[in-house]
């Protein structure tokens, strides 16, 4: 067979630039944004799932902060676990004075639907972000009427959620409202194959969410000062199990530092190290540790400048790496 010119890889809207028809909200971490296909998307539903101490609430707060910094809209945070600390969130940069925390507590899925619908209706076309933290703490009206110990198959909550999402998904899209739902990990009792973990609420979010990200605790970071050792952060792995705006099943790792938030620059540097591209920022594995120590001496403006420059390299490198895994031909010419 005569040799032909090698076919160029077909253009792919996921990696050859961000999709222009979508409006993104940054997660606060460049590698997470890349794994998500550009960040969280206005008008869509995002589900963040994780065990304890996996920075779920912190990521939700950073999503609100970045939304308010980049979009003229309204933010709502609905906390159902009676565990949210406004002062701690403010210390990490959340502008709490610009966030609506609601006048009445949400106890049931039905309360959630009514509150979210009211939030959507009040926007009058303005973009918004609504965070529910967390879905697991919500009951349903049928369960609230039952006595503790009374027999139940537990299906009412899942049915109520499915009905709610059928009613509000299109409204969210038309209103440019990002809905972030936080879920806790549950053991999938009796599972002999497939997923060993699940979350409450049935399959509704698996179908209606555009992005589903599972978080797992990898390591606790500790340091010793004057002979006293204390944890100062955790390393988290993020696995994007569903993605309707980018390639699914992309993973990344990031550090979360207590009282600070996601350490974006460290996550970017570790990513470049993992893909052997530290040379793109004129570093190598040997002098990376020296560079990290030098960062401690920078003031805030210098640090953010360095962070932005490295982030630009990470985005370009991510596209370059992902493009190598794309098919080399188009199925339908």
Image (tube, rainbow, N blue to C red):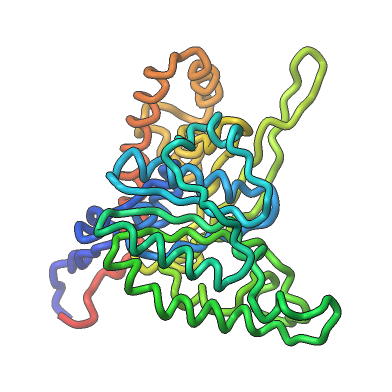
Residue extending farthest to the right is: 149
Residue 307 found in image quarter: top left
How many circles with numbers are drawn on the protein?
0
Residue 256 x %, y %: 59, 38
Residue 114 x %, y %: 48, 69
Residue for point 46% across, 68% down: 242
Residue 139 found in image quarter: bottom right
Residue 75 x %, y %: 41, 48
Residue for point 72% across, 79% down: 145
- Nearer to me, 251 or 5: 251
Q: Is residue 291 left or right of residue 246?
A: right
* The C terminus, quarter of image: bottom left
Residue for point 83% across, 76% down: 148
Q: Is residue 286 left or right of residue 306?
A: right
Residue 184 x %, y %: 65, 61
* The N terminus, quarter of image: bottom left
Note whether residue 324 is visible: no
Residue 317 drawn above or below residue 226: below
Residue extending farthest to the front is: 103
Note whether residue 327 is visible: yes
Residue 103 drawn above or below residue 209: above
- Nearer to me, 164 or 100: 100
Residue 142 drawn above or below residue 54: below
Q: Is residue 331 left or right of residue 139?
A: left
Residue for point 37% across, 65% down: 44
């Amino acid at each position: 067979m005569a040799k032909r010119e090698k076919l160029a890889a077909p253009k792919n809207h996921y990696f050859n630039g961000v999709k222009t028809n979508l409006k993104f909200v940054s997660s606060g971490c460049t590698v997470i944004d890349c794994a998500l296909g550009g960040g969280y998307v206005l008008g869509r539903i995002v589900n963040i799932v994780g065990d304890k101490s996996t920075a779920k609430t912190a990521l939700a707060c950073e999503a609100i902060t970045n939304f308010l910094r980049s979009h003229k809209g309204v933010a709502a945070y609905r906390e159902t676990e009676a565990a949210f600390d406004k002062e701690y969130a403010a210390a990490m940069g959340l502008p709490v004075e610009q966030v609506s925390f609601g006048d009445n507590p949400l106890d049931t899925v039905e309360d959630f639907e009514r509150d979210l619908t009211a939030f959507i209706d009040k926007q009058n076309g303005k973009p918004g972000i609504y965070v529910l933290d967390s879905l697991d703490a919500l009951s349903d009206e049928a369960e609230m009427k039952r006595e503790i110990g009374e027999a139940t198959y537990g299906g009412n909550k899942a049915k109520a959620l499915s009905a709610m999402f059928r009613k509000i998904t299109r409204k969210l899209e038309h209103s440019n409202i990002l809905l972030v739902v936080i879920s806790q990990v549950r053991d999938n009792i009796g599972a002999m194959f497939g997923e060993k973990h699940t979350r409450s609420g049935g399959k509704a979010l698996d179908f209606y969410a555009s992005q589903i990200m599972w978080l797992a605790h990898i390591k606790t970071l500790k340091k010793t000062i004057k002979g006293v050792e204390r944890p100062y952060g955790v390393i988290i792995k993020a696995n994007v199990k569903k993605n309707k705006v980018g390639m699914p099943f992309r993973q990344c790792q990031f550090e979360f530092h207590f009282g600070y938030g996601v350490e974006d620059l460290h996550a970017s540097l570790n990513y470049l190290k993992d893909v052997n591209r530290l040379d793109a920022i004129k570093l190598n594995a040997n002098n990376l540790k020296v560079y990290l120590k030098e960062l401690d001496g920078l003031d805030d403006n210098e640090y953010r400048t360095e962070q932005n420059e490295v982030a630009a390299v990470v985005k370009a490198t991510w596209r370059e790496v992902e493009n190598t895994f794309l098919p080399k031909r188009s199925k339908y010419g």
